[in-house]
Structures are given as C-alpha cells and as structure tokens.
Amino acid sequence: MLVALLLAAGVTTTTGGLPARTTAREAAVFANRTAFTAPCTDFFSSAAARLAAQATRSLAALGWSTLGAVGPAFTEPAALAAVSGVSAFYVQSHGDHYWDPVAHGRSSGVRADAGRCENAPKIVANEIAAARAGAAPARLVVIASCHNGEARSTLPDAFGIARHRSEPGEEGPSSFYVGYVGAAWQRQMLRFEGAFWAALLDGESAGSAFDRGLLSGFNPARLDPQWWGAYDYRPVAPQQIPPYRPGQRRG
Amino acid sequence: MARHRAAGAALALAAVASLGACAAPASVRAPDAPRPITARESGAAAGAARRLALLLVEPFPLAATTAVPATIVIEAGEALVEQRLEAPDGATLTVRTAPDGALRLLARGGVPTGGPALGETALVARGLLHLRALGIGLPAGPPLIEVAGGRRVLLWERRVDGVPVEGDALRLVLSRSGALVGVSRPAPAPLAGAPAPMARADATAAGAAAQRLLGTGRVEGTPVLAWVAPGRGGGDEPLELPRRLAWVVAGTLGDGTPCALHLDAATLELIGWDWAP
C-alpha cells in the first residue's frame, strides 16, 4: 500500500502533461507479480514481492527515496514516468530483446505487470532513453529479468551506463549496472540479490557486493549475473542539496 | 538472509560459547532483550580474521588495517560472527565463522577483475592451493566451473547417496587469473529422512504428475533427483528447513516460460518450483 501511495505521488506530479523530474536522490522499484503467480500460473509465488521488498528496503537504507509499484500498478506509463528522472532503478519482470516497430529493430526491455497474465505492454530501451533525455547517467540499475545482462542488451545505454568495467582502484563512472545473461531463475535471483544488497549495506563497493553475490548459494547453472560500471563505486544516495530559492545568497 | 547488526541477540549466545571461554548455552532461543556483541567477542573475531589474512596465498595488507566492530549475522538459521578488515588501499576482507569456529565465508573486496585468463586445469590447481592454504580439506572430484561477471565460480556440490543437495556446495570464487575472491562453505543442510529406505516414485511417474500440474505447459527432458529446500511456492523456501528428496522436473509454463517443478520423491506432492521470466 505504501509503495502504491509513493507511486501515486511520484507519477502524478506533472507539469504541462510531462512527468516532473524527480530528484537525484530518488530510486524506483517495480516488480511484476501478476504473471508469476496464481491464477496466471498454476502455482503460488511470493518471489516478485520479496525481490522488490529487499531492493526497496536496501535502497532506502542506502539513503534513496523510493517510489514504484509491485503488481498491477506497475504499468508502462507509471514506469516510464518514474524512470525519467530517478538515479537508481530496480525492476523484476520478463525481459528480452523485443521487436520495436518504431525503431525497426530489436530493443531490449522488460514487460510491465498491468494486471495481465500474458502480453503485458513492454518497456523498451528506446522509450527509456527518450524518457531520460537530458538526465544524468543512472547510478545504480538492477534488471532482474532474463537476457538484460547480455552484451547485446541496450538497457545499459538507455540509462547512460557504458558497457565497460572499471577495475578496483581505477577511476570510473559513478554508475553500476547488474543484469543476467540468458534465462534467470527466480529462486537463484533471491539468493544472489540478497547477498548483493546485504554487502552494499555492509559498506562494500558495488563490485565487491557483486562478488559477495557470487559467493551466495545460488546455482550458477541457473543464473549468470553480469555487471558494468565502476567496481569501486558505492551507490549511496547523493547528499540532498536544498534547492536554490530566488533572493537566497549563494554560498 | 536475516541480518542483525550489533544487537543480534540470538547469535550472541552462540558467539559467547565460541569466542569466549564460556559454557555452552542451554538453549539457542533468543533472549528477551537483545544485547550488543561484547568487545571481547569482537576482539576474538578480529584475531580470527587476521590469522586467516596471514594464510592467504595473495597477501592481504594487514599494516594499518582497520577492524570494523564484529557483528552477528543469521544465515539459513545459523548464527555467525562476521568480522571485516579494511585496508588503506580500499581492499576488504570479510570473515564469517560459526559458533564452533568453522569458517563459513571468506570474501575479499577489491580483487582485480582483469589479468591473463587461466585454463581450467590451472584454475582448479590454483583453487586447491587456496583451499589448502586456508586449511580447508580438499574436496574430491572435479568442480563445476562457471564464468559469471568476469569471475570464475568453482563448485563442489555436496551429494548424498549420489544426489546433489541444493545450495550445499563448497564454493570458490576466483579472478580470471586465479586470485582468491572468496570461499563459502554453508553448514551442511539437514535432510528429511534417510535416502536409502525411502520409497521413490520413478521418473516416468514424476514426469506424468508434473504434466498434470502444468496443464497447457509441458514437461521437457527427464526428471532428476535432488535434495531441495521445500516451500509453499516459488521463492519462499526457508533454507533452515530440512531438504527433501524430490524429483526436479523441467518444463515450460503455458506461456512458454521455463520452469522446474519440485515433486516429493515418494508422494509426488508439489513442494516447490522455480522459473525463469
């Protein structure tokens, strides 16, 4: 409920029909619950909510103000509005390199929840890039879906993150992207990401936290994590700077 | 994973038993009021981490190292003491030990990701060298080797009666050039029932049962046996519960999503599932 309220607050703040820019301290967390549990499947699953909860909890502890949605409120417009200005983004859903009729080519992305079992609207890299036009590169992006850790995924670019790894001790961008290669199994994600978030909360760098994920109990035959960005980067929220007010002396 | 910072009570009792010279607690129940880990316990944990640092094949820079106050971590129902050392160059060493002093996790932060890539044979040899240096008994047989995020993950699965136990592997993570990134050794998971006398349905029956559950989806391949963590559904399996012998049946859901059903080996009851969106 809280997440839904935050989402409402985040996506209904519009100016002239355009989503208002969120602040550099904001993070968005979205998860597709509908397609992954009964009645859409014959089986019950709490994985989507648990993945989103551990991401939300961890981002908040790292200083981020979070908005987003789990379940039917995770729609294409809601996600694109939220993604336009946030600096950290987590999503759990179906993912692939989808055919984009506008671009006449493949565009990587994920499916919204939208309360649909199948064929929910897609949110693809081209749309994200357009929504984020002019925004600074994202600082932390975790795409908990199939395929979006592959070298061909265009999602890192959409968030302004180069597909390059900066070594420990090397100057690099203030960005970190995590995705999975090929099929990514939910139970394995829960273990990997649980260790990843826990290490970040311990004060580890993003690269070191990724390494801690590799040491967790996931089955590497069923999950192939990948990252780009700067190993040494710590994705804590930037200090909130009070907005400049007219007449205020600049320090 | 439930994580408890300094006020991690349930484990503090166990930590006292391990790190102090106190008598073993009569119960592992959490006390009513949590208490922070003591300076003595923290100091003992730091000593253990420093001793391990000295054993590493690639030296950890201990000079001017800072020991972060020890914390209590509960993982798969087990209380662990965690100690972290931070070197001035940004390198970190995290060590988790069980109440009996057994090493559960050693993780180095800041290990380079590049360097020349070792072949598999050299990688395994290097891995065994790391294990021997740390005093970890050498596992039998070749490991499963996977590449992930530029690292090399070496897994020696625990097998009981020839059947793998989910999540119960000695895991070694190395850089591509063989430097130690970390090692993890979970406590052996309890098993529900001895395997030998258990009645087992056969793979054909398991496949047929799975097909009935999948409806418009379909079973693919041959079911295999595994000791799995049971849950009510996908993603909610408590890792501290005993593993159950199950047929793992691969297939697809009605929309084509890959899935795996876990059916109790004897009754073919659904005890869990996994899927890849």
Image (cartoon, helix red, strand yellow):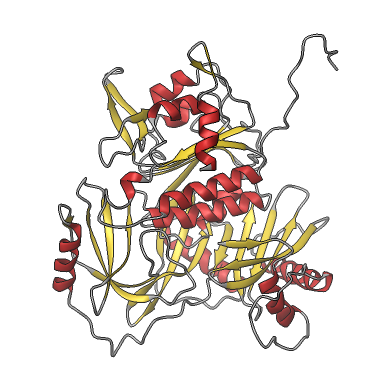
Q: Position of residue B17 (x, y in %)?
A: 72, 82
Asked whether, in this view, residue A85 is left or right of residue A170, the answer is left
Q: Is residue B60 above or below residue A9?
A: below
Q: How many marks?
A: 0
Residue for point 48% across, 13% down: A17
Q: Which residue is drawn at 57% across and 75% down?
A: B136
Give residue B214's position: percent from left, percent from top.
Answer: 19, 58
Residue at the (83%, 13%) spot, across then down: A248
On the image, which quarter does residue A114 sit in? top left
Q: Nearer the viewer, residue A28 or B141?
A: A28
- Check the image and report above or below for B276 versus A174: below
Would you identify the image quadrant in which residue B213 lies? Answer: bottom left
Q: Where is residue A26 in the image (x, y as percent from the top left)?
A: 60, 32
Q: Along the horizontal axis of the image, is A37 left or right of B57? A: left
Where residue B39 sits: x, y (%)? 83, 69
Work out whether residue A179 or residue A50 is closer to the camera in this orientation and state it: A50
Q: Is residue A179 above or below residue B185?
A: above
Inspect this view and state whether residue A80 appears: yes
> A107 or B149: nearer the eye?
A107
* Image quarter in which the N terminus of chain B is found: bottom right
Can residue A89 be seen from the camera position used here? no
User: Residue B246 vs residue B214: left or right?
Assistant: right
